[in-house]
Amino acid sequence: MKTTSSAKHDHQAHIRSALKNLANDEKIIDLSETFKVLSDPTRLKIVMALSKDELCTFDIAKVLGVSESAVSHQLRLLKTLRLVKQRKNGKMVFYSLDDEHIEDLIRVASRHISEY
């Protein structure tokens, strides 16, 4: 008996499972934006620098060896996507990761690349 190409590749259960695992378009766009922002080396360094302690713009600039202006620009993008948050203490502004999930993302990605 001859089987057709479509019959050999009828994996409806797998297709349904894959479709169930897809997020809605809005969530896909948000995830994509998060990964896009983290794909920049300077922004990734900022996130990694903030993984243990909060830092002010001046301190982040010193750690990265870039200008405070460059750090401020990157922090604005990171704040927009809720990857970092700020806390004011008088005239000083301190930055930290928005929540532990950001650190989890970096830790999992680091573990993934170390397995190469």
Image: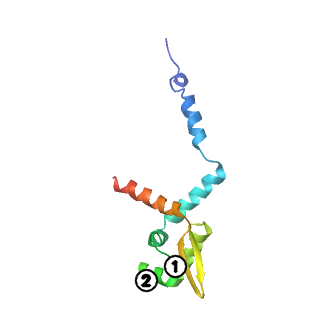
Q: At 39% from the left edge and 54% from the top edge, which residue is drawn? A: 112
Point 56% across, 61% down: residue: 34
Decide which of 89, 50 is in the foreground and name it: 89
Q: Which mark is residue 12?
A: none
Q: CA distance from mark 1 to mark 2?
A: 10 Å
Q: Amino acid at mark 2?
A: Lys
Q: Which is nearer the N-term, disc 1 or disc 2?
A: 2
> Crowdedness of circle 2 by 10 Å Cα count: few (<14), some, many (20+)?
few
Residue at figure coordinates x 50%, y 64% from the top left:
38
Q: Secondary structure at mark 1?
A: helix
Residue 67: x, y in percent?
Answer: 48, 84
Q: Which mark is residue 62?
A: 2
Question: How many numbered badges does the structure rendering display?
Answer: 2
Q: Foreground: 90 or 26?
A: 90
> Relative to residue 85, is residue 105 drawn left or right?
left
Which residue is tagged 1? 71
Whether the residues at callouts 1 and 2 have beta carbons within 8 Å, the answer is no
Residue 6 vs residue 99, the one in the foreground: 99
Q: Nearer the viewer, residue 89 or 93?
A: 89
Q: Residue at x 49, y 85 (%)?
A: 58
115 left or right, relative to 84: left
Secondary structure at numbered mark 2: helix
Instruction: Give the residue type that dot 1 points to.
Output: Val
